[in-house]
Amino acid sequence: MDFFTYLFCDWKANRGNPKGKLVMLMFRLVQYVNRYLLLKIIFIPYLIWYRFFVEWVLCIELPRKLTIGKGLALYHGQALVVNLRTIIGENCTLRNGITIGHKKLADGTLSGSPRIGNNVDIGANACIIGDITIGDNVIIGAGAVVVKDIPANSVAVGNPARCLTPTPSQGEGVNVN
């Protein structure tokens, strides 16, 4: 991971959004520190500060072991919860009230966490749970509850989420699957 490349892409994605820039700066720094044992020891106060400030003050849970591609945009990042095993691709947008994580299965165990592709735009108050894959270039509508895979180049809306995709026979029309 090239710290500055990721940071500059994040800052560009959060242009005009000082809170998003601050959170992504702090997140990228904590990720960099997390890579080296000596830095972890030296920066223990920073790791504690990150957890307190970002999670408790700003109400954004981005664990230090989370995998996020470059160019993440945080719009109105309040009440944002992302599980540490989630994988988020490049150039994604997260809004307020989003929950992304695992779910409890019938046998009492926990599922895997979502894998989110590149260029995914997630609307406010969306919930994405379970061992699912969200394809590239997907838009997830506000309030959607996603519990199944979403193919690339789709729009997912509703509870439970369903895909809206153009059909070849209708040209520009929209078909609800």
Image (cartoon, rainbow, N blue to C red):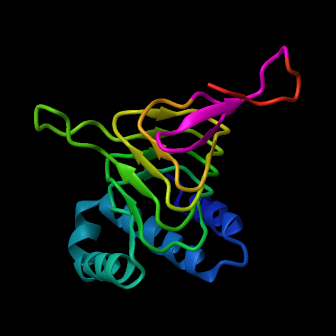
| Quarter of image, res 131 | top left
- Figure check: 139 above or below 77: above
Q: Quadrant of the C terminus?
A: top right
| Residue segment shown in magenta | 151-169
Instruction: Provide residue 154's location: percent of width, then percent of height.
Output: 66, 34
Horizontally, is 23 left or right of 42 in the view? right
Q: Nearer the viewer, residue 11 or 143?
A: 143
At 66% from the left and 78% from the top, the residue drawn is: 17
- Find residue 23 and report its horizontal and vertical position in percent: 49, 74
Residue under the point 44% across and 68% down: 27
Is 80 on the left or on the right of 142, as rendered? left
Is residue 16 rendered magenta in the image? no
Q: Position of residue 5 (x, y in %)?
A: 61, 59
Judge whether 68 appears above or below 133 on screen: below
Asked whether 156 falls inside the magenta stretch, the response is yes
49 or 116, nearer to the observer:
116
The quadrant in which residue 40 appears is bottom left
The residue at the far left in this view is 108
Prevalent SS, magenta region: loop
